[in-house]
Amino acid sequence: MKLTCSSVDLQTHLSLSCRAVPSRPSHPILGNILLSACSDTQQIHLTAFNLSLGIKTRFLAHIETGGQVTIPAKLFQDIVSHLPEGDITVSVQPEAQETEDADPSWMITLTHASGRYQFKGTNPEDFPQLPAINGGHSLQIPTSSLSEGVQSSLVATSTDEAKQVLCGVHLTVQPDSLEFAATDGHRLAVAQTATQVTETETTDEAQAEPTQLTIPTKTLTELDRILSTSKPENPIALHYCQGQVIFDAQSAYLTSRTLEGQYPEYRALIPKKFKNHITVEKRQLLKALERIAILADPKNKVIRLTLDKKNQDVLLTTATENGTGQEVIPAQISGKDLEIAFNSQYLIEGLKVTKTSDIRLQINETHSPAILTPLGGQNLTYLLMPVQITG
């Protein structure tokens, strides 16, 4: 195998694909990257797979001789990440075997303008194949809609592996919209994007019910990285069947298991009516929260919000043995005077995923869920459970 490619292209695609290389592989081959070069298409494919998540990236190069080889991922990435900009040449030659029973190996030579590196590769036939979906359904989804929903919902996923179905985002696909929902039991994010979803292929009869999938947090985090390198106007192909999902962009291909189990009926948690409505400038509230959170208790991160209808402002306070903090934020308040407490980290993270200049906070009582929503084009509902106030 022999090829020439841009060092920037190789660095970019290697950094994406290596995200699927396990830090502690259950088998040595999983710690490798599969490099495939096709002379017919003049494309390089880089594949990593941890048996749950697989990422394959592809880019154009000059392929003199096609072939495949597996390369230790960390070593390869460490070398490539330090290369200067410019063309690099990769050539692969089989090494002579000392005995007939010895495992085959390859010598990889990487050459650039001012240097040359050699290291060993291993048998590509030992690398596991990425799962394929035979049958099932295929959809075309706009990149911008998928990206917006993923970024808005990921923040609320759980990290508690005992509640595995919550360690991901629940995706509901309908012909004219996507809905992304995530909850960790303390908060809930529901993002909706109005879009045209096209079903391109199916082996079953037309679905009477919307598509529903629960996709792991790790998978969508890596998908978000891939989407950031894709053109917003290009659609993403989504293929799915029971237990497996594939996202196919022009420059990358991601496959993952879906999470099993019944996702909670999250819509029932969202109150239909509210007694108190607070409208406030997002940036001003966010900056005040970030300042006052410095003094919040590291364990519960509690900050109190006191609504003052008469003066039309919100008082933020925290008090610990390390000190006290206070900030006053002007707001438009309808309802009654009220004091409520939240985990400051959850509130800050909710504000950060809103993309409008103003937000609305809706509250009923001190101990009931509050809803944070952006005022503008973004359709996001961020529910927060309050913290019980003692003293």
Image (cartoon, rainbow, N blue to C red):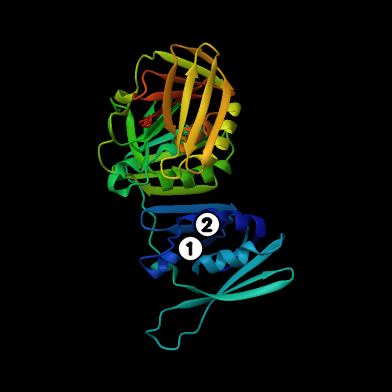
Residue 61 position (above or below residue 237) = below
Q: Residues within 10 Å of mark 2 (few under 14, many from 20)?
A: many
Counting every numbered tag in the picture gives 2
Q: Label 2, on which residue?
A: 45
Amino acid type, label 1? Leu
- Numbered badge on residue 34: 1
Q: Residues within 10 Å of mark 1 (few under 14, many from 20)?
A: many
In which quadrant of the rendered image does the N terminus lie? bottom right
In which quadrant of the rendered image does the C terminus lie? top left
- 57 vs 388, left or right, is right
> Which residue is most to the bottom?
98
Q: Quadrant of residue 220?
A: top left
Q: Quadrant of residue 247?
A: top left
Question: x and y percent of residue 9 in the render?
Answer: 63, 55
Question: x and y percent of residue 120 in the render?
Answer: 52, 76
> Which residue is most to the left?
262
Viewer-proximal residue among 364 and 381: 364
Residue 37 position (above or below residue 180) = below
- Residue 142 visible in the current orientation: no
Q: CA distance from mark 1 to mark 2?
A: 8 Å
Residue 283 position (above or below residue 249) = above
Seen at 65% across and 67% down, the residue is: 89
Seen at 54% across and 41% down, the residue is: 294
Amino acid type, label 2? His
